[in-house]
Each structure stands twice: as C-alpha cells, then as structure tokens.
Image (tube, helix red, strand yellow):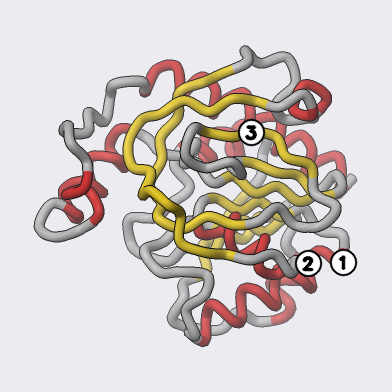
Amino acid sequence: MRVLAFRHGPHENLGWICNALEAHGIAYDYAGSDTAVEEARLHDAGALIFLGGVMSANDNLPFIRREIEHIRAAIVRGQPVLGICLGAQLIAKALGARVFKNAIAEIGWAPITFTNAAQRDPLFADLPPSETVFHWHGDTFDLPDGAELLASSAVSRHQAFRLGDRVYGLQFHLEVTPDMIAQWCAEDAACGDACEVKDPIDPTAHSVQSGELARLVFNRWCSLVNNRVE
C-alpha cells in the first residue's frame, strides 16, 4: 500500500509520520504543487495527506483549487484523508467551512486541550487532558458541518477535528522534528512570521514529549489506514 502526501515547499515534509508509515509497512510518495497529479495515483493511494505551507487556503492558486477538489473526491471515494495546518484548512474549505485570519498568529510551543469527544476518538483516546505541541499558523477555520471537535488552544478553538471515521484535520504541527523546526526558524528569520514571537523558539523544548505523542497518534492513524484498505 502507498500513501500520497501533498507538500507545498521543500522543507514541508512528513517528519514523524514517516516513522509510523515505515513501521506499518506503508510506502509513501510526495506530490509537489508545481504539477498536477494523475488520476490513477489519486485513486490507487491508500490515503491522502495534505501538509502545511506558507500560502492560504483562500489563495486563488491552481494547486490550491486542485487539492480542494482532490479532498472532495477522496471523501466521496471513502479514502482516509489527513490534513495538517494548511492541509486542515484545505479540508475545512473543501467541506464548505470558512477559512479566515486568526486574531493572533500562533507560532511556537503551546498547549492544546482535548475535548470530551477526543476521549472516544481512535487517534486521541486515553491521552492526558492537555499536551504541548508545536504551532505555526496565522489562519484558522470554522468547524465543518458534521465534524467533531477534538482539540482547542487558548487562541485557536479549532485545533483538531474528525469527520466520519476517515477524515482528520490537525491545525497544530504534530509531525515536526527538531530539525524541521530549526530549518523553519532559519528560513523565516529575516522577515517572516517568527519576528512576531517575543522569545526565541527552542526546537527541542518539548520535542521528546511531542515526539512520543506523534508516535502514538500517527501509529494509530496508520492502523486505521491499514484497516480501511484490508
């Protein structure tokens, strides 16, 4: 089985998700934003993953429009879909929800709180009430109709959601490794979003605990994908 991951920049990658995929014997390919993806690759994928990016789900760009259509088609086909940050916003938009500028850009390590629904969720059941995870976003979204809210933060109510049993959106970056965070900070240092952060971002500050959470959640997601395909 093979998963297709949509990336929107050279340093947007699967991070900790790779470990889970490899542990479950799931191969993966990346699809870039510069070229369209053949229909056969979309149909044959065991699941689709939509990663983050510096652009907005509201941008009138060809690949943004294509990916929104890919998400809609995958949901109709019953494929598992996972969206992270921009990817979660694309899922929300594909489902008819509003994507808009958040009151505060959320960048760096900050806690999320899990909802009661998360305690019954296949990915987030039996976790502590709160976990500290990495964030890097300026936009947020309304909860899509029919979706269950799974997590919130102090400045972004909609941090994670599930639609049905196959579609997940995570606003926070659970996939990031310390090396990825360091690279993002280095790229952004000159004039980007990080200039709004009062204190320097330490890529390793909560990386051990966050890595353990990522291993648990993404291994559960891979089990879900395998079970859907069998």
Q: Nearer the viewer, residue 81 or 119?
A: 119
First in sequence: mark 1 or mark 3? Answer: 1
Q: Disc 1 vs disc 2: Cβ atoms closer than 8 Å?
A: yes
Measured from the top left, where is residue 135 in percent x and y? 41, 40
**Residue type, numbered disc 1:** Arg
Q: Which residue is drawn at 65% across and 25% down?
A: 114
Q: Nearer the viewer, residue 166 or 1?
A: 166
**Residue type, numbered disc 2:** Ala
Q: Disc 1 vs disc 3: Cβ atoms closer than 8 Å?
A: no
- For residue 77, the mark is 1
Q: Distance between the residues labelled 3 and 2?
A: 24 Å
Which quarter of the rendered picture does the C terminus lie within? top right
Q: In this view, does 129 lie above or below 217?
A: above
Packing grade of label 3 (10 A; few <14, some 14-19, many >=20) is many
Q: Nearer the viewer, residue 177 or 60?
A: 60
Q: Is residue 8 above or below residue 169?
A: below
Q: Is mark 3 on a helix, strand or loop?
A: strand
